Each structure stands twice: as C-alpha cells, then as structure tokens.
Amino acid sequence: MSIFMQLICETYYTLSRYIKGMFVSSGDELANHRTAVLLHEYGIFIAAALFFATPVIPKLRLWLSESERRKQAGSIILAGMLCVLFLWAVSFVIAGQNNPFLYGNF
C-alpha cells in the first residue's frame, strides 16, 4: 500500500470500504442525481472541450488550405460559426438581464 493509503486505512478491507464510501454508498458520492443532471446540462460543453483539446484544429486548417475551394468554404463556415456563437452569447446576456448579479454574465 502507498503511504497515503496507510495513513487513512490500516487494512485492505478498511481501504476498500473507504473507496466504496467515496464513490458508491455515501451521501457525497461521485455519481449521484446531481452529477447526472450536470452532465445532461453541460455534456455538450464537456464534449466540445475534450474535442478541441486535441490537435484537430491545426489538422483541419492544413486540410482546408490544400485547395482554393476548401479555403473559401472554410472562410464561409468560420464566419457562420462566429455569427452563431455571437448570437448565442448575446442570448445568454439577454436571458440573464433580470439577474441582480448582472456582472456575473461578463
């Protein structure tokens, strides 16, 4: 056992109960209803963050620069994506305009 495990548990049985209590059967478990709700609400953002954390953008830029037609299509798609992103951000600001803590949106 590692030093950390030896500090918190005396035997493997108490270690297994400790780990089980952390993730399965305690009130502060890792996978509970709130976790499922948060994953449902923010799952697309987590997936996008994981996707864009990979080197996909440089490879896409290289692929788009291979021909003139792809460059034009990439420019049009990028402009469209920026417009959609701008409208989405503005909608969040407008939706939260009755919030007394308006500075939290910026």
Image (cartoon, rainbow, N blue to C red):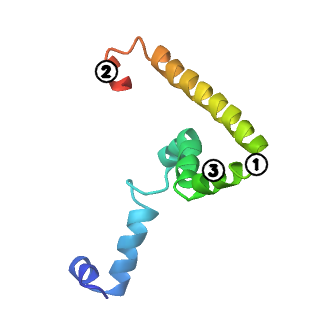
Disc 3 from disc 1: Cα separation: 11 Å
Question: Are the two marked residues, 3 and 2, in contact with CB atoms closer than 8 angstroms?
Answer: no
Whether residue 36 is visible to the viewer of this picture, yes or no, is no
Disc 3 marks a residue whose amino acid type is Arg
Of circles 3 and 1, the one toward us is 1
Residue at screen point 48% across, 44% down: 34
Seen in the picture, residue 90 relative to 73 is either above or below; the reply is above
Q: Residue at 51% x, 46% y: name it.
A: 33
Q: Where is residue 100 in the image (x, y as percent from the top left)?
A: 32, 14
Q: Residue furthest top?
A: 98
Q: How far apart are marks 1 and 2 (CA)?
A: 45 Å
Relative side of 101 to 75, left or right: left
Helix or strand or loop: what does disc 3 sit on? helix
The residue labelled by disc 3 is 61
Q: Name the residue under label 1.
A: 67
The label nearer to you, 3 versus 2, is 3
Residue name at image x 51 percent, y 19 percent: 90
Q: Name the residue under label 2.
A: 103
Residue 55 drawn above or below residue 72: below
Amino acid carrying label 1: it is Ser
